[in-house]
Image (cartoon, rainbow, N blue to C red):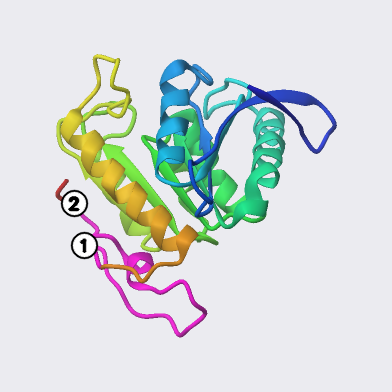
Amino acid sequence: MIELTSGDGHIFSAYRAEPADAPKGAVVVLPDVYGVTPHLQKEVDDFAAQGYVAIAPAIVAQDAESNGSSVSTALQEIQAAVDAVKNVGRVAIVGYDWGGYLAYVSANSLNDLACAISYYPAGISEERWVKRKIPTLLHFPENDPSMPIDEIIQFRAQRPDVSAFSYPDARNGFNFDAADSFNEGAAHSARERTLFWISQYVEGQKPIALKNAGSYAQAKTEKKKKKSGGDDMGPPDA
């Protein structure tokens, strides 16, 4: 673990992993309410194994119903984590549950982020009204009482600028391989899409169109005219 200092001057810890070779860019990994657990450290290590400097700030464990000051404190910590790794290249942010909510909010609130990815983001339906400033990818479980499939469909209809996938039979926490909610198929599909998204917007590779991936996946990262793209606005195939 290392120590970082947030914008308000307080010190907090973070877990950081380095790639074996020259980094392709960086990934900031945001935990769920359980914090920087061994499972989350493994996620950080896995991103490092893919060639990215990866860092997980130990943000204050709250839920998406927390008050504004809690979110503000978390965002300052996340910005400090971004600032700690942005010297290596473009930075992606990936979050899970509460961290997924914060990743979505960070996309419009923080500096120096290339793209955002959220897994089963808690409370995200309350944030659906504002257009995204950077490419954003969401992974929704279809078997999650906290976000019924009808709500997912509504979210996607209201936010066509977001690429979203839902996963049949998957529950909240489907990416956590030590939990009862682990769904290997959903986790594998989401992982492939996440790595594609990061490679596209952090490394700047020419994109490959993915089914239901939305307009962002059709656009090159260079500053050119926007291409039209489409999402089917219904629950996609996993």
Q: Give the range drawn in magenta.
A: 209-235
Residue 31 position within the rendered picture, expressed as x and y whole percent measured from the top left = 50, 27
- Near mark 1 (Cα within 10 A), the count class, few <14, some 14-19 or many ≥20, is some
Answer yes or no: is residue 155 visible: no
Residue 232 position within the rendered picture, expressed as x and y whole percent measured from the top left = 21, 62
Residue 56 position within the rendered picture, expressed as x and y whole percent measured from the top left = 56, 31
Residue name at image x 40 percent, y 57 percent: 199
Q: Do the residues labelled 1 and 2 touch (CB within 8 Å)?
A: yes
Q: Is 219 a magenta residue?
A: yes
Q: Which of 10 and 14 is in front in this view?
A: 14
- Disc 1 marks which amino acid? Asp
Q: Which of 171 and 11 is in front in this view?
A: 11
Under circle 2, the secondary element is loop
Q: Is residue 197 left or right of residue 65?
A: left
Count all numbered tags in the image, as a single digit.
Answer: 2
Q: Is residue 183 left or right of residue 20?
A: left
Which residue is labeled 1 in the image?
A: 232
Q: Quadrant of the N terminus?
A: top right
Residue name at image x 49 percent, y 41 percent: 19
Answer yes or no: is residue 226 visible: yes
Residue 153 position within the rendered picture, expressed as x and y whole percent measured from the top left = 26, 49
Q: Nearer the viewer, residue 95 or 141?
A: 95
Q: Main secondary structure of the magenta part?
A: loop
Which residue is labeled 2 in the image?
A: 236
